[in-house]
Image (cartoon, grey):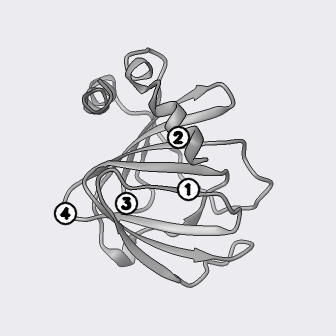
Amino acid sequence: MLNVLYDIEDKMDVLVRQPGWNSMYINYHPPVVERLWKQVGDYRVYLHRIHPCEREQALIHPHPWPSAIRVLEGSYEMGIGYGPGMTTPPIACKLIANTTFCYEMVEPDGWHYVRPIGAPSLSLMVTGKPWEREAPRSTEPLNPMGEQRIEGLLERFRIFYQ
């Protein structure tokens, strides 16, 4: 997936200037995430602003698809675990992801949490086709962001991809 991320980054200067970004304000569980996303061929591109929270609040979760992520601004603590099904596995590793750090999650049973440190983080994520994997889901409705917030977030990403 990292090669897909790098290919998408080569197009980001154009993508962040195009209309048609979808938005989601994810606030059902810490950390709060402002998300923009767009389908690009077989992949989905996500732009995230993730807000700080306490370690014990951070949502540990599996991704329902293979993904690659680059941290563009700020830093976050990431805890990593591994396990099948819906039972949260123990955290086996913790690391600090700083600006320009890239990683991929390519195992269906990989879990993680992210917790920005001190200030919101900005990250780019690219995902592939969903796996056939049961995963925890929100029971709360997820709402779109307002136009002013969408444009402000896009402008932040345009700075990185000029």
**Residue under label 1:** 104
* Amino acid identity at mark 3: Pro
Rendered residue at 71%/62% (across/down): 108
- Percent x, y of residue 113: 46, 67
Residue 83 - label:
none
Question: Splitting the image into 4 quarters, where does residue 111 fall?
Answer: bottom right
Q: Nearer the viewer, mark 3 or mark 4?
A: 4
Q: Amino acid at mark 1?
A: Glu
Q: Height in image: 4 above or below 52?
A: above
**In the figure, is residue 91 to the left or right of 76?**
right
- Tell me the crowding category of disc 4: few under 14, some 14 to 19, or many 20 or more residues within 10 angstroms, Cα based: few
Among numbered discs 3 and 2, the one appearing first in the sequence: 2
Asked whether the residues under the numbered discs 3 and 4 touch, taking CB atoms below 8 Å apart as contact, a structural biologist would say no
Distance, label 4 to label 2, CA atoms, is 26 Å
Question: N-terminal of the two: label 1 or label 4?
Answer: 1
> Residue at point 56% right, 65% down?
61
Classify mark 3: helix, strand or loop.
loop
Q: Which residue is mark 2?
A: 5
Task: Verify CB contact (< 8 Å) between mark 2 and mark 1.
Answer: yes
Which amino acid is tagged 4? Gly
CA gap between label 3 and label 4 equals 13 Å
State left or right for residue 17 relative to residue 149. Answer: right
SS for callout 1:
strand
